Amino acid sequence: MQLSPRAPGFVANPYPAYAAIHRHGEAVFWEEYGHWCFAGYDIVNLLLRDKRFGRQITHVASRAELGLAEPAPHLSAFDAVEAHSLLELEPPAHTRLRTLVNRAFVARQVEQMRPEIATLADRLIDTFIADGGVELLSRYAEIIPVTVIARMLGIAEDMAPHLLDWSHRMVRMYTFARDEAVEIDANAAARDFASFIRDEIAQRRANPDDDLISLMLTRSARDGEILGDDEIVSTAILLLNAGHEATVHQIGNAVATILEFGLCPRAMFADRQTTALAIEEMMRFDPPLHMFTRYALTDCEPVPGVSLRKGETIGLLLAAANRDPRRFPDPGNFIANRTEGTHLAFGAGIHFCLGAPLARLELQIALPALFARLPSHPRLATTPQRRDAYHFRGLTELQLVWDQ
Ligand code: HEM
């Protein structure tokens, strides 16, 4: 398949291309990326759980063996953060780190934050409800997730603009055809972010509290597990970045879906059960993260006709899997009470989104709260434009207007 991930038509709407892939089969060699991509629901779900594939490769083969370039010196600070990132590790290192933070993110634990997230959402709506319009991403969608994750880590809320800036600059590393200027900037952001977290660690070491940074320090000491400061820095940065980058755009994509398709929020968000189902359908229908990659850890043929060599990269098209007609009949139709089961927007297997219960809770609060307070017919002031950042699908801005 030849298709630029930056082609404006594709960025605006990748779903026709996914439908074409489904008509052709379950996998496609994407020339621009230079690797196989998988789109079928069943195969993506299997490969995410398949131990023959991993996020890391240098634990099973040397760079020289794989023909990989040596780490670039201008990316040393960025690489240092990635080196201990949960998302980039494989067991046993992955299991050890994930177990340590997992307890804070299980559904029962995050559910306790419901009242404070609801209060935050209401407080933000108060700031614009009388204005007759708002740019929703900057005034609402972005603020809720960054505030919540900062609070969990015990970081002052007025740091939010810095956290967002560092995070956005680091995340640009994952976009297609990045250039060296992006790399240098991402490295500078990683260096400053890490230095900020090191200061936070020093403060918690002196004065432990009940936040996640303190917990990483004290629990690791208590369990006899020594978590080095580098590991705590990487984990805190990952939690802060992953804790808001996707949720912002899921809120934006969901609001755009409701308004573009003329859906009825009052019916969808009638009670907690209908809300939970509708949010899952939002995530199936237009998720914020479209592709994650894995390395083949061994030579293999995951589907007939696709032979992979050890070290080869594959792409798992989560958003295409969510539109597989073999799994979700009439996939281009938004059906709020679908019963076909889980989408893959949070991934699957050992790297399944750690923050899924938190993201779900934030969405289940933020969307109903917004539509409950807006007048019955909010409108899009301008046609929403998608960011030129495949595979992070989100809007550049979301301007809403309503009659007072
Ligand atoms: C709608 C919002 C979100 C979406 C769609 C999303 C999606 C994902 C996906 C697809 C993965 C798996 C990546 C892979 O398999 O390579 C992942 C991993 C992860 N997510 Fe999320 N995420 C969201 C929100 C959050 C939040 C709020 C947090 C808060 C902490 C979070 C933390 C993480 C972490 C730490 C990982 C790495 C887990 C691991 O490697 O074991 N995410 N997320």
Image (spheres, helix red, strand yellow):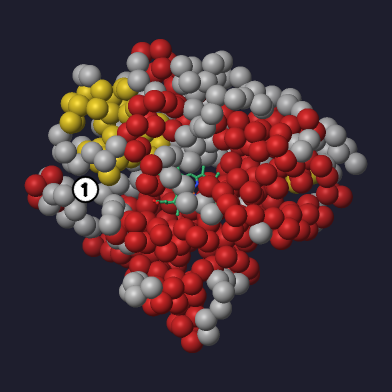
Which residue lies at the image location 51% right of the left edge and 68% below the top edge? 212
Name the outermost residue toward the top: 23
Q: Specify whether residue 298 is in view.
A: yes
Q: Nearer the viewer, residue 189 or 307?
A: 307
Residue 367 is left or right of residue 283, and the answer is right
Q: Where is residue 211? Give x, y as percent.
A: 55, 71
In this figure, what is the number of numbered marks? 1
Which residue lies at the image location 52% right of the left edge and 39% below the top edge? 288
Reply above or below: 349 against 119.
above
Which residue lies at the image location 53% right of the left edge and 54% below the top edge? 106
Residue 31 is left or right of residue 129, and the answer is left
Q: Where is residue 117? Give x, y as percent.
A: 69, 57
Q: Specify whether residue 381 is in view.
A: no
Q: Where is residue 341? Give x, y as percent.
A: 54, 29
For numbered disc 1, what is the local secondary structure?
loop
Q: Which residue is mark 1?
A: 57
Which residue lies at the image location 90% right of the left edge and 41% below the top edge? 404
Name the quadrant containing residue 85: bottom left
**Location of the N terminus (image quadrant):** top left
